[in-house]
Image (tube, rainbow, N blue to C red):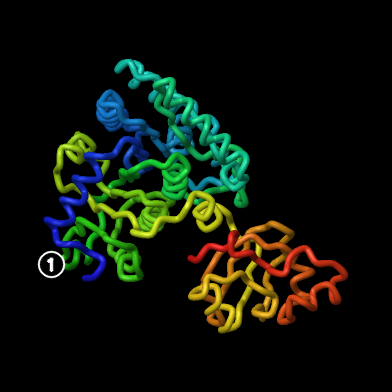
Amino acid sequence: MTFQLGIDEGLNRRRQILDGARRLVVKVGSAVLTTSQGLNRSVMEELARDLTALRQSGMEIILVSSGAVAAGRKALGLGNRPLNMKEKQAAAAFGQSALMRVYEDIFEARQQKVAQVLLTHNDLANRDRYLNIRNTLFTMFDWQLLPIINENDTVSVKELRFGDNDTLAAMTTNLIGADVMICLTDVDGLYNGNPALDPRAQLVHTVARVDQEVEDMAGHVHSALGTGGMRSKIMAARMVAARGGSSLICCGREAGILRRLFAGEPVGTFFLPQDEIMHSRQHWIAYTLRPKGFLVLDEGACQAIMAGGKSLLPSGIIEIRGDFGIGDPVHCLDGNGEPLAAGLVNYAARHVRKIQGRQSKEIKEILGFVDSEEIIHRDNLVLL
């Protein structure tokens, strides 16, 4: 399989990356942190022990932690019934404080101070706030704090949500330029088949790149993974790889899993970084911003931006979907609806609809003004 390396080669690459890692993001899911009785304190104790040891070795660490809704559900006696959005937000408000209280207690016992950071997607989609959060986290590192990040479930609505904490962890990894993202879940990693049905199914130790074959493997995994699931973890790993980082998916319920990982044991599935690395702003456009609309391009425009490194001109646009303003993010699609690129537009949708398919020299005659000859300038266009 082309996405895999040989076991020895893959493990050697893993050891090299982990030995050189100085900044780490660890994401732990609800399936690991909670039981039917509420928060799993023994697992949290084990996690705190490992993270404190890594911190004391000089590593800068962020913990992305789920568990607020589950903790609130148990503490408030809500049972296992489905909760609506308002109930989830209320449970998260109560559970987040309970979650942090446990973390503060178990880390304080190890002389490690922690700090709570609650984020929404808008906090990272706004470039100024994105950079401010980055600087704040670096200040926490300078103060020897261990930031614990969670989505601000109490205020998040559909438009503000990350979707799952795997995405939040990937965005955090790229935000601070971490070397490695580790997803602790309730499965051993990614398998090339369903181990419950196929005795030949094997754990994939190393993934050189995330392609369709790797994405399809997510269907082999059956677990109580919560909102994310294996697919979201693979997509998160792809986001991290695009910025030059590595990722690992492994079982967070196993004792000393982080210590064993950094000691060289071949646990979990390791995802290698891409050879071609996106710059920070490019990655922000491609993976953090959500498209406000879509531009369907003709074959010539697709070739120009994909192979020729050109800007997008109005002449290559055959359809506009959505209502966007100047500077908003959009995705460019080919004739089959497949995404090719993400970018920031120079014109609002109502103006693009008037000049689509026309030459740049006609813009002033049609609109009465010219802000730019390009709909998306190459500097604001990122291939997907």
For this view, does 96 lie left or right of residue 23? right
As rendered, which of 369 and 135 lies closer to the eye?
369
Q: How many marks?
A: 1
> Which element type, helix, strand or loop, lies under badge 1?
loop
Q: Residue at x 59, y 48 (%)?
A: 125
The residue under label 1 is 200
Q: Residue furthest bottom?
A: 299
As rendered, which of 16 and 318 lies closer to the eye?
16
As rendered, which of 65 and 73 lies closer to the eye?
65
Report which quarter residue 354 is drawn in.
Answer: bottom right
For this view, does 288 lie left or right of residue 16? right
Q: Residue at x 32, y 49 (%)?
A: 247
Q: Residue at x 69, y 80 (%)?
A: 315
Q: Tell me if residue 140 can be seen.
A: yes
Vertical relation: 59 (above or below) 121: above
Q: Position of residue 82 (x, y in %)?
A: 50, 48
Vertical relation: 88 (above or below) 373: above
Q: State which quarter of the image contains the N terminus.
A: bottom left
Q: Position of residue 200 (x, y in %)?
A: 12, 67
